[in-house]
Amino acid sequence: MSNLDRQAALSVCGGKGFVVADPVRELLTPRRVPLGESTEVRRLLPNLGRRMVGAWCFVDHYGPDDIADEPGMQVPPHPHMGLQTVSWLHEGEVLHRDSVGSLQTIRPKELGLMTSGRAISHSEESPKSHARLLHGAQLWVALPDAHRHGEPHFQHHAELPHVTAPGLTATVILGEFDGAVSPGSTYTPIVGADLALARGTETSIPLEPDFEYAVLSMSGEVHVDGVPLLPGSMLYLGCGRGELPLRAESDAGLMLLGGEPFEEELIMWWNFIGRTQEEIETARRDWMEGSRFGEVRGYAGDRLPAPDLPPVPLKPRGRVR
C-alpha cells in the first residue's frame, strides 16, 4: 500500500534511542488519511513520537467500509524500496499487481507479503466484482542493511499456522508465536499475529521479554493489560513483558505486532526507506525518470507521481524514552 500523502515529510526512524525498555501502556491516536476514491485509513505508525515497533514501521487500519456501490480500494502503481509490505484482510478482497509480474487476489486471513529489496512497484485495487465490505490493515516492515538491496519478490500464503486456547485463535502472520512459525520470509526477529477472541474470554498470551510490542484493535471491545481498546486504535506496550493479559467484552479481533528493537537508524519518506537523504532523492528521481522500479502491467490508470521533497535538509527529531 502507498503513502498517498502529498505533503510527505522526511522522518528519522529506528535506533534504540526510540525504544521504551520497560512495560508501558501508550495509547496511539490515529491520523485519518484518504486512500483513493472511496477508502479512508487510520494511520497508527508512524505516529507523533512513536515511529516503529521492532521492524514494523507503518500501520494503516481501514474499514469496515460498505463499498457495494463504490470502486473500493484503488491505489495506482507506486514504488517501494528498503521494506516489506504486509496485506491483511478481515473482510473483502484486494487484487495485487507488481513489477515482477505477480497478479494475486488476497482474501481474508491470507498473507500477501511483498519484499521490495532494492526496488519494486505495485498497485492494489478492489476487484471489479467485489464483496460488500472491505476491512483490513496494511503494514510495512523495515529491511535491515544486509537485505535491503536484495532481489524484489512477492509471496502469497493462503494457509497459515494457528495457535488455539479456550476462547482464542491466533493466526501467525509473520515470525513465530507460541511455537508456531509463519512461512512468510523475515529478516529480523519479529512477530505478527491475528488474535480472534470470543466474548467473555479472559486469558494471557506469551511474549518475548526482549521484544517491544504493540496491539492494534481491528474489531470489538477488548481490555489489553487493563486498558480498554476500541477498533482503529493501537496500544504501544514497550519491552520487558513475559505475558499479556487480555479480556474480551465482545467478540473481538486484534493484531499483535512485535520484534527486537530495530538498531539501525532509518530515513523514511513517502514509500521509500533509506539510510541517507541522498538515497531518498535518488529513488524519487529514478521513479519519476527511470526504469529502476519496473512496470506494473494491467492496471487501468496512470502510475502515482512522487510528491515534492521538503526543501530543507533533514534534521533528526527528538526521541521518546
Image: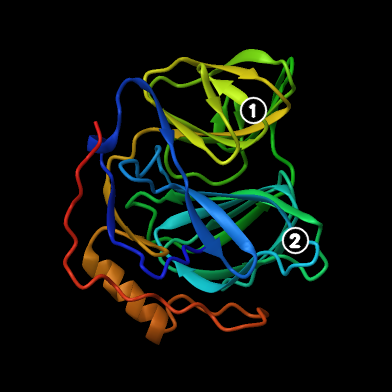
Could you tell me residue 53's position as x and y percent?
40, 38
Q: Are marks 2 and 1 in contact (CB under 8 Å)?
A: no
Name the colour scheme.
rainbow
Residue 86 lies, with reference to residue 73, above or below; the image says: above
How many neighbours does mark 2 have within 10 angstroms: few (below 14), some (14-19), or many (20 or more)?
some
Please name whichever residue, 184 or 312, is drawn nearer the observer in this view of the structure. 312
Total numbered badges shown on the rendered structure: 2
Could you tell me residue 318's position as x and y percent?
19, 43
Q: Residue furthest bottom?
A: 289
Residue at image coords 44%, 68%: 119
Please name whichever residue, 82 or 313, is drawn nearer the observer in this view of the structure. 313
Which residue type does callout 1 highlight? Glu
Label for residue 41? none
Which type of secondary structure does the marked residue at label 1 adopt? Answer: loop
First-in-chain label (2 vs 1):
2
Quadrant of the image occupied by residue 131: bottom right
User: Which residue matches tag 1?
Assistant: 221
Quadrant of the image occupied by residue 106: bottom right
Res. 88 in view: no
Quadrant of the image occupied by residue 183: top right
Residue 170 lies, with reference to residue 74, above or below; the image says: above
Which type of secondary structure does the marked residue at label 2 adopt? Answer: loop
Residue at image coords 70%, 16%: 201
Res. 226 in view: yes
Residue 179 lies, with reference to residue 132, above or below; the image says: above
User: Which residue matches tag 2?
Assistant: 67
Residue at image coords 63%, 13%: 203
Q: CA distance from mark 2 to mark 1?
A: 24 Å
